[in-house]
Structures are given as structure tokens and as C-alpha cells.
Image: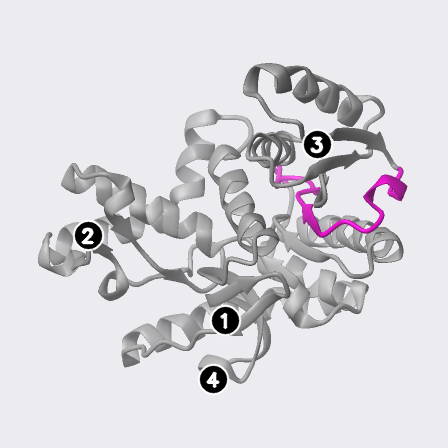
Amino acid sequence: MKNKLTVVGAGNVGATVAMRVAEKELADVVIVDVLEGVPAGKALDLAEAAPIERHDAHITGVTNDYSPAKDSDIVVITAGIPRKPGMSRDDLLSTNAGIMKSVVSEIAKVAPDTILIVVTNPLDAMCHVALETSGFDKTKVIGMAGVLDSARFRTFIAMELNVSVENTHAFVLGAHGDTMVPLPRYSSVAGIPITELMSAERIEALVERTRKGGGEIVSLLKTGSAYYAPASAAVEMAEAILKDKKKILPCVTYLQGEYGIQNLFIGVPVKLGSAGVEEIIEITLTPEEREALHKSAQAVQGLVDDLKRLG
């Protein structure tokens, strides 16, 4: 198979990304992790499913060896630790920044022309670490957030109106977290704005549920966090790039003046193709929406400032 996609991190998100990429026959897959045997075991398990799922993607799993990732078209980075009870935000930020630096420096050696899709949290801040460490062009470092958050909003709209999720369209901008900015004006069902289909109170309830979508799953699972939908979101981005689809998706990208935001990764609509982020789409926002987006950007800036303080 011509394309190659590497997943760094063989946990639930990474393994699910590997599975979906292979089953869609988008690329051969390399799984890299620090745990001895785990990536090789998951790769073998996925390979043994291939005759049943009817695909011929080649899947390799390795421990602390980045050489099989050589010349990868895309690298999806899921490696990192989740926030644990008693852990401060600074601890999480510092630990995952260290992991991100280590991973990206290794990837840059073996796949200098790759496109990075960052999934590790805190996502917007980790994109800054990846960009700085890799030295890549800003168009080749992309964060997975808006696709996931928009999918959650679409799911809740479909549930509320009892319609097919295929009929729903939604846009969520901003940081991946409580300050994200769902946009009901740009959200629709079969082209009909949701503002025509439900009350302002119900829309606000869905917006709030979207903002807390990840936390809702964490509270239900008790241990761990979401992985099916995050993996699907990363794969949709990868597919748009590998197939040069020129697909417009909300992604975390580096802004240099767009939306009045300077030198910061934040979620906005972009056109994804073989070159990565090929265009940043600037949509018209109301003063309230613009204020909410800038508030979200301030939250990201706070994390970036903390990263600098922590060294």
C-alpha cells in the first residue's frame, strides 16, 4: 500500500485509529509505544482481523523504535497521560509537553515531510510544543478537536430532533474544552438552521452538553475517557489529507491574524488536503461569537504562558 500512517501511542485512541485506518484501507499502519510488547500485540491482533474485515493494510507495532515510521505521510500523536486525581494542571502540562517533545523530535528525524495530527491533551497547547519542536511549517501541524466537538453537537441535535445524524451539520470553534464555541447559526439539519427547529433554551442545553461532552463520558466510564469518537475524528482528518479531498473541517490550526488572533493554535474551519492546512476559512461572526472565540483563545494563551514558565 502506498500511503503510510504512524500512530504514536497504543492506548485506546491510538489502537482505534490504527484499526479504522486499516479497515478503510487508507494506509499501512505503524504503531509506536513505550510499553514493551503492547504495540506489537495490538498490531498482530489487528492483522489477524484483516481476513475477516477484508483489507490488506500492513500493520506493524514497535516499542521505542521510530525507524518503521520512516517517510510516513501522516503521524497521529495520542501519546500522553490523562489527568489523575490529585494531579495539578501544571503537572499534566509539564509531563505531556515532555512526552510531546520526545515523540516529535524522533518523528522529525525519520519523517521530515510528514503531517502531524495532535490528539494529546491539553490539545491546543500540545500543538505549540509540536510546532516548536518539529520546526515544521504551520500547515503541517494540526490539532484534532473541532471535528470531535462538532460530531458531538451533531449527535445531540439528531437525538433531540429524532433525525438521521447524516442530515446534521454543525460547527464548533475555539479551544478543546469548556471554552469551546458551538455555533448554532451555522448548524443545520438538511440545510434547515437548527434555530428554526428548536427553541433557544433547547439549543443552549445542547451547546452546554457539547462543551461538557468529554467530561460526561469520563463520569460514566469512571476510569478512562472517550476513544471511539476521538479516533474517528482523527481518521476523518487523515482521510481528507491522504485523499487530497479539500474537505472543510474545524481543526486546531496556527493563526497569524485570522479572526484577530495572533500566533496561537485555536480551532477554526480549515481546508484539508495533501499539503495539510491548505486554507483557513474566515466566517462572519456576531460580536458575541467573536468575543466567545477570543475568550477561548485567552484560555489557550494561558496554557502557552504556563508552558514557557515551566520551561
Disc sitting over residue 260 in the figure: 4
Residue 194, percent across and down? Answer: 17, 56
Determine the CA span between mark 2 and mark 1. Answer: 31 Å
Vertically, is 198 above or below 81?
Answer: below
Q: Residues within 10 Å of mark 3 (few under 14, many from 20)?
A: many
Q: Which residue is mark 1?
A: 297
Which range is magenta?
A: 65-86
SS for dot 3:
loop
Q: Nearer the viewer, mark 4 or mark 2?
A: 2
Q: Nearer the viewer, mark 3 or mark 4?
A: 3
Is the C-beta separation of discs 1 and 3 under 8 Å?
no
Is the C-beta separation of discs 2 and 1 under 8 Å?
no
Q: Quadrant of the N terminus?
A: top right
At label 1, the amino acid type is Ala
Which residue appears at 30% of the width and 41% of the height? 155
Question: Of marks 1 and 3, which one's residue comes earlier in the chain?
Answer: 3
Q: Name the side, left or right, on which 246 lies relative to 292.
A: right
Is the C-beta separation of discs 3 and 4 under 8 Å?
no
Q: Nearer the viewer, mark 2 or mark 1?
A: 2
Which residue appears at 50% of the width and 45% of the height? 233
At label 2, the amino acid type is Ala
